[in-house]
Amino acid sequence: MLSRTADHLYWMSRYIERAENMARVLDVTCRMSLVLNITQSEVDLWRPPLQIAGNVNVFEAKYGAYTAANVIRYMVLDEDNPSSILSALDSARENARAVRVAMSSEMWESVNSLWLELGQRVRAGIGEMEIGEFCDWVKSRSHLFRGVTYSTMLRDDGYRFARLGTFIERADNTARLLDVKYHCLLPATEGVGGAVDYYEWSAVLHAASAFEAYQKVFRDTITPWKVSELLVLRHDMPRSLHACFDEIMAILEHLSAAGSEECNRMVGELHARFHYGRMEDIFQGGLHEFLLDFIARNNALGNEIQRTFLRHPWS
């Protein structure tokens, strides 16, 4: 497969996953804004979504105030924000258009119709009252795209690169989501275990589509330790770091080629952390430090995949 074709398929999937992740975080934040918490300012509520996306400084320079309208506009409609839902889906469609012959017609129709309908929704206007419905629409269309990909695409290298992009992006978002809640929103001592703290951890589970899974696995009150275990170490939780790297490791084994030894080494090292790791050891060393280190290593892995298999950014 041409590296240029692999590059388009890989980034098409990453951008669609990114749009879904932004929709998940924004939807949960909007739901949290409905919870009465007299100690929480607008900054406390609306800054975390931007911390997850890593866009705080850019947002502050452009918009200044942390208001619902500003954050929603930046995360959904801002064309200068590469992580906005509009930018991500536009980039996904451009990558798909470049390699229409490398995927099934149903995949192209799914991406193209998503892009066309997005334009209609943007022109109609997306207000604060409609943002929940809009986020649900983004998530459902992302699910549709992955279902069509799984059901119609030939199991060749193109399929593997498309899947690889999905799981690299998903692992990054899961780690950022958990880190922002645990480190940046850690409540005061009197807030631990309180109603708002419980609702915030429930919101994290909902953002990762893990609320029902948590109830089945633990059958207990929601606690930071168990939420972290579910989203980091559980291999049977689809959006966990362990599950993502189960998929990434299997994909790269199929894609092994001359010069890919470093990719395989990096994946194997990260996978071993989740496969053999224990939550008590992670907490003892610091969950925040563990997640920051993982995000950096996952980004380094993405760069190595780009260097080894895909076209260089400047080509």
Image (tube, helix red, strand yellow):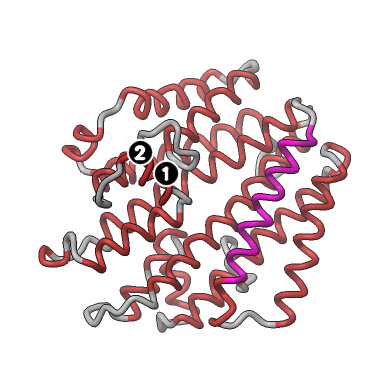
Residue type pointed to by label 1: Ala
Q: Is residue 116 left or right of residue 76?
A: right
Judge the density around disc 1: few (<14), some (14-19), many (≥20) Cα neighbours within 10 Å: some
Question: Vertical placement of 261 versus 190: above or below?
Answer: above
| Residue under pointer 2 | 217
| Residue under pointer 1 | 213
Q: Is residue 187 left or right of residue 169?
A: left
x and y, in percent, of residue 63 in the image: 48, 81
- Span shown in magenta: 133-153
- What residue is at 50 percent from the left and 35 percent from the top? 244
> Is residue 134 shown in magenta?
yes
Residue type pointed to by label 2: Val
Residue at the far top: name it: 258
Question: Vertical placement of 271 versus 133: above or below?
Answer: above
Mark 2, secondary structure of its residue = helix
**Of 102 and 2, the residue lying toward us:** 102
Q: Is residue 146 left or right of residue 46?
A: right
Judge the density around disc 2: few (<14), some (14-19), many (≥20) Cα neighbours within 10 Å: few
Total count of labels: 2
